[in-house]
Image: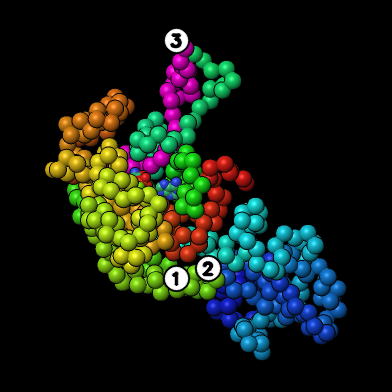
């Protein structure tokens, strides 16, 4: 007898053979002579209907324990279903209960639960339609990302999670230490970090970019795809303390080519999910955000709008909107501004380039005006910034000057500077926030609901 997953059963419909299937009961329906089980095994959003004929006394005995949440193995023949909703159903000949789920206690009832409640039961939420769909889409996007870069011969580089350098220079790092916090070793009144595990202060990485640059400056195009950590005290629907980032770094590449790659990349991976995750995407379209699929299809077919920061500020100053955060040249764009540009003005993804140096990181290439840097952010409707990137400063002296200006210690970045001292090259890259991408694709409102186990300011359950 063939053991099959629900997805294959529903696509292949092997009507003649006897099959075996395992999964969890989602719901049951009972009538005088029949009983029906809706079984889900995670392979696809659709349930398999299992038909129980009550003339089978062995099966009837099991019915009290065939409740929502119970795990079972069922054997039988697949037959055409007379009911309207499904083409086929399994006519049970034998059912084994693998694990009961006491009906009155099982936390996932038939009704719809709030996402806030489901976050409290993150060990059971993958058994809901929404989280099953998010998980399959997350998986497909991961695969599409590797596929995109591998097809273009980018090398996948594993950059370190523990690091001694602050890539973004923003000081939002989690410190890693094995020093006894209640009895710190001291030297002249200060904590003596030479006694720490690595002999110096270390942190969880905020970005793999600087190490990525080392490899791009030797092997050509590379990418990273790993976890990053930011100790931001933000309680927004777009910020996590632990999130996954994809960071390509391209050798012999300027800002224009960087923007071209970012645009091609986003369209490719969104197109991949539309093609390969149709049942899940239809679910999001129906239950999470009406019109999501159409919006994504339009984006895949569109050309992203490209403007400079200075042009963006001019658009915002023209706006007849009372922004909470007043607009003037030099401000860091807030989410309200990003949303206004993408949703109201351009109704399209927008790439903004050439930001003031004051609001961007030290490593970005300086423009001739000495005021703006060759940065670029990709903004999308509803989310705002989804990608941040730049052309890197390749000139040793300019980079040093910038470090000094920002009062960053040159010694800490000695190896980064040597990439400019020996055989420097123009190079560029960007970072895509993986969870923001999943939010954008699925329409899920809160970033905590697109990662299996969210870590955010004041919460790290499970
Ligand atoms: O703009 P960011 O800070 O850029 C960098 O880290 C660069 N080193 C990337 C590079 O050039 N290689 O972050 C990149 C993206 C953002 O656009 C956003 O999508 C996401 O990472 N991101 C976050 N996602 C979730 N929670 C947070 N706290 C995030 N901070 C940034
Ligand atoms: Mg950014």
Q: Quadrant of the N terminus?
A: bottom right
Read off the magenta span. Answer: 189-218
Residue 288: mark in rendering:
2
Q: Residues within 10 Å of mark 1 (few under 14, many from 20)?
A: some
Residue 80 falls left or right of residue 218: right
Give the x, y percent position of residue 380.
Answer: 36, 60
- Residue 154 or residue 289, whichever sits in front: 289
Residue 82 placement (x, y as % from top left): 66, 89
Outermost residue to the top: 188
Q: Is residue 201 magenta?
A: yes
For the point 40% across and 34% down, the residue is: 171
Give the SS element for disc 3: loop
Q: What label sits on residue 292 in the rendered view?
A: 1
Give the labeled residue for mark 3.
Answer: 188
Q: Looking at the image, which residue is at 63% across and 87% down?
A: 84
Along the line of sight, the residue nearer the viewer: 146 or 334: 334
């Amino acid at each position: 007898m063939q053991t099959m997953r629900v997805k294959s059963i529903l696509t292949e419909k092997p009507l003649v053979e006897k099959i075996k299937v395992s999964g969890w009961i989602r719901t049951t329906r009972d009538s005088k002579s029949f009983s029906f089980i809706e079984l889900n095994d995670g392979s696809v959003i659709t349930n398999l209907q299992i038909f129980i004929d009550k003339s089978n006394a062995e099966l009837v005995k099991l019915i009290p324990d065939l409740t929502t949440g119970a795990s079972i193995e069922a054997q039988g023949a697949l037959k055409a279903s007379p009911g309207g909703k499904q083409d086929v159903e399994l006519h049970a000949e034998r059912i084994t209960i693998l694990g009961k789920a006491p009906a009155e206690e099982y936390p996932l009832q038939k009704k719809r639960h709030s996402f806030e409640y489901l976050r409290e039961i993150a060990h059971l939420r993958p058994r809901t339609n929404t989280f099953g769909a998010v998980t399959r889409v997350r998986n497909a996007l991961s695969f599409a990302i590797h596929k995109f870069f591998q097809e273009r011969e980018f090398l996948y580089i594993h950059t370190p999670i523990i690091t001694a350098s602050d890539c973004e220079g923003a000081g939002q790092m989690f410190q890693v230490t094995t020093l006894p916090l209640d009895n710190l070793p001291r030297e002249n009144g200060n904590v003596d970090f030479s006694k720490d595990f690595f002999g110096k202060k270390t942190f969880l990485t905020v970005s793999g970019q600087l190490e990525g640059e080392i490899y791009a400056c030797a092997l050509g195009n590379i990418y990273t795809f790993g976890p990053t950590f930011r100790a931001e005290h933000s309680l927004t629907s777009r910020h996590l303390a632990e999130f996954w980032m994809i960071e390509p770094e391209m050798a012999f590449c300027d800002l224009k080519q960087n923007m071209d790659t970012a645009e091609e990349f986003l369209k490719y991976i969104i197109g991949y999910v539309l093609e390969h995750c149709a049942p899940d995407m239809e679910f999001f379209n129906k239950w999470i955000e009406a019109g999501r699929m159409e919006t994504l299809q339009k984006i895949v077919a569109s050309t992203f709008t490209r403007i400079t920061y200075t042009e963006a500020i001019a658009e915002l100053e023209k706006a007849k909107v009372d922004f909470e955060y007043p607009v003037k040249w030099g401000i860091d764009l807030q989410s309200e501004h990003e949303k206004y540009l993408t949703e109201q003005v351009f109704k399209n993804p927008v790439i903004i380039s050439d930001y003031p140096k004051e609001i961007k990181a030290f490593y970005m290439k300086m423009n001739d005006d000495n005021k703006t840097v060759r940065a670029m952010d990709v903004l999308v409707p509803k989310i705002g910034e989804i990608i941040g990137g730049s052309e890197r400063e390749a000139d040793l002296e300019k980079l040093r000057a910038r470090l000094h200006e920002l009062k960053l210690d040159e010694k800490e970045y000695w190896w980064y500077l040597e990439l400019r001292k020996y055989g420097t090259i123009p190079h560029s890259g960007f970072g895509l926030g993986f969870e923001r991408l999943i939010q954008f694709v699925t329409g899920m409102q809160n970033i905590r609901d697109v990662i299996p186990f969210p870590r955010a300011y004041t919460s790290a359950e499970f």
